[in-house]
């Protein structure tokens, strides 16, 4: 299917670039004379901007189609990467790396892509299709992170960012394959709710709130690990290549994890899948911290964590679609993702802040464990059945 292939390719490139940002932490902070808090703050702003603007990107994509949103996002992505390469002031760096790249990611990743998939794939295959798209993002991490590491080592961190800026423009022709005729022909896609009605309904529904709470934890865990683990490993005397291979392993195994999660979401209770994923993450972190830190233990942890990395994404979005329908799916997914990005902000910023204050990442690891248990528990009360609408609602 054209929609699924083009959407998966866009997510591969957009998320692949994003997953490698942790490789730039030490080169940039050492070159600019900054602490890790400055880099962590910029990445935190990026995740927060991505979450906030993802809501509006979803609204526009639901109303006018994904093509325009993704094409504009690709151009903005390139501009942000160029600014990230050339900024010499920490606030300018935060503007480009945080606000501008976050804006670009809002328009080129899951909320927009999943809205298109939800409207063009039948209910019987929707969770599976979302799993394929999420697996594509994971494949992007497996493919792009080693490439980014190679570019940094061979050409320098600034040139590497310029090359990636040019690569983002490939998303524009891919976005052409996501044009939706229904968006250009009024009446072909009927909406029984206005945006306001859809939002009021969702935010009054406890299950939506539980899903948002779980996604907050997802963001905290994965962004803290993705951004700070390379430095954590280097602090403990491991070679830089170990971090690159670890992130690549996370991406590789998450290809399987997200696909499996999406497929299981067609057959099993989605809330039970989510509870298992969050609890398993906490167990994995505990075992990682207890084991001697060696390349082998890092690779085992990365492989296991990779199976769980973005496996929450297709299941959570499929649950939203199942409960509320697909008419406003990009927007509602955007709100769910906003919660994820608040968690991302806290994870990446606290990682840098607490490291600068204590000289250790230990407190953030412990917090990630506790939050995983919390997320497992709050997903259990979710009601997955379609929400009852006894009377038609009109815009």
Image (cartoon, helix red, strand yellow):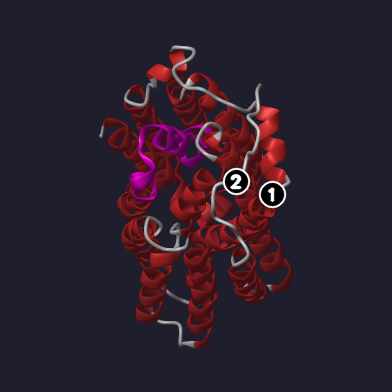
Provide residue 189's location: percent of width, then percent of height: 47, 22
Provide residue 257's location: percent of width, then percent of height: 36, 62
Q: Which residues are magenta?
A: 105-130
Which quadrant: the N terminus?
top left
Provide residue 234's location: percent of width, then percent of height: 48, 70
Pick whichever, 241 or 338, lies toward us. Answer: 338
Residue 33 in sight here: no
Residue 178 drawn in magenta:
no
For image coordinates 38% across by 63% down, the residue present is 250
Left or right, 200 with reference to 232: right
Which quadrant: the C terminus?
top right
The answer to which image quadrant residue 350 occupies is bottom right
Q: Is residue 167 above or below residue 291?
A: above
Residue 175 in sight here: yes
Cα–Cα gap, marks 1 and 2: 9 Å
Pick whichever, 386 or 260, lies toward us. Answer: 386
Q: Earlier in the sequence, mark 1 or mark 2?
A: 1
Whether tag 1 and tag 2 are in contact, CB under 8 A, the answer is yes
Provide residue 49's location: percent of width, then percent of height: 64, 39
Left or right, 141 with reference to 46: left
**Mark 2 = which residue?**
387
**Mark 1 = which residue?**
205
Circle nearer the viewer, 1 or 2: 2
């Amino acid at each position: 299917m054209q929609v699924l292939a083009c959407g998966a390719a866009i997510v591969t490139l957009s998320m692949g670039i994003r997953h490698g940002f942790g490789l730039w932490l030490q080169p940039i902070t050492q070159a600019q004379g900054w602490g890790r808090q400055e880099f962590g703050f910029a990445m935190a702003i990026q995740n927060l901007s991505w979450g906030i603007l993802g809501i509006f990107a979803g609204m526009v994509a639901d109303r006018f189609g994904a093509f325009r949103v993704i094409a504009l996002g690709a151009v903005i992505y390139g501009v942000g990467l160029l600014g990230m390469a050339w900024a010499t002031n920490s606030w300018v760096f935060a503007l480009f790396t945080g606000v501008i790249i976050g804006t670009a990611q809002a328009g080129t990743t899951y909320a927009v892509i999943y809205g298109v998939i939800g409207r063009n794939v039948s209910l019987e295959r929707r969770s599976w299709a979302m799993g394929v798209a999420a697996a594509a993002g994971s494949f992007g991490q497996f493919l792009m992170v080693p490439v980014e590491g190679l570019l940094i080592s061979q050409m320098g961190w600034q040139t590497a960012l310029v090359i990636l800026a040019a690569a983002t423009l490939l998303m524009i022709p891919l976005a052409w394959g996501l044009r939706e005729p229904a968006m250009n022909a009024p009446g072909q896609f009927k909406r029984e709710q206005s945006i306001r009605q859809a939002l009021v309904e969702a935010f009054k529904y406890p299950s939506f709130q539980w899903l948002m709470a779980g996604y907050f934890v997802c963001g905290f865990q994965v962004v803290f690990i993705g951004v700070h683990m390379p430095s954590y490993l280097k602090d403990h005397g491991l070679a830089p290549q170990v971090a690159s291979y670890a992130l690549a392993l996370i991406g590789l195994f998450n290809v399987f994890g997200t696909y499996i999660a999406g497929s299981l979401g067609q057959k099993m209770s989605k809330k039970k899948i989510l509870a298992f994923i969050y609890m398993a993450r906490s167990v994995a972190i505990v075992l990682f911290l207890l084991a001697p830190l060696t390349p082998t233990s890092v690779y085992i942890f990365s492989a296991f964590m990779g199976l769980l990395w973005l496996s929450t994404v297709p299941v959570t979005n499929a649950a939203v679609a199942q409960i509320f329908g697909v008419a406003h799916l990009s927007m509602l997914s955007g709100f769910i993702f906003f919660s994820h990005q608040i968690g991302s902000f806290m994870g990446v910023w606290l990682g840098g802040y607490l490291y600068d204050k204590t000289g250790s990442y230990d407190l953030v690891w412990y917090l990630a464990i506790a939050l995983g248990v919390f997320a497992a528990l709050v997903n259990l009360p979710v009601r997955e059945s379609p929400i009852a609408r006894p009377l038609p609602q009109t815009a």
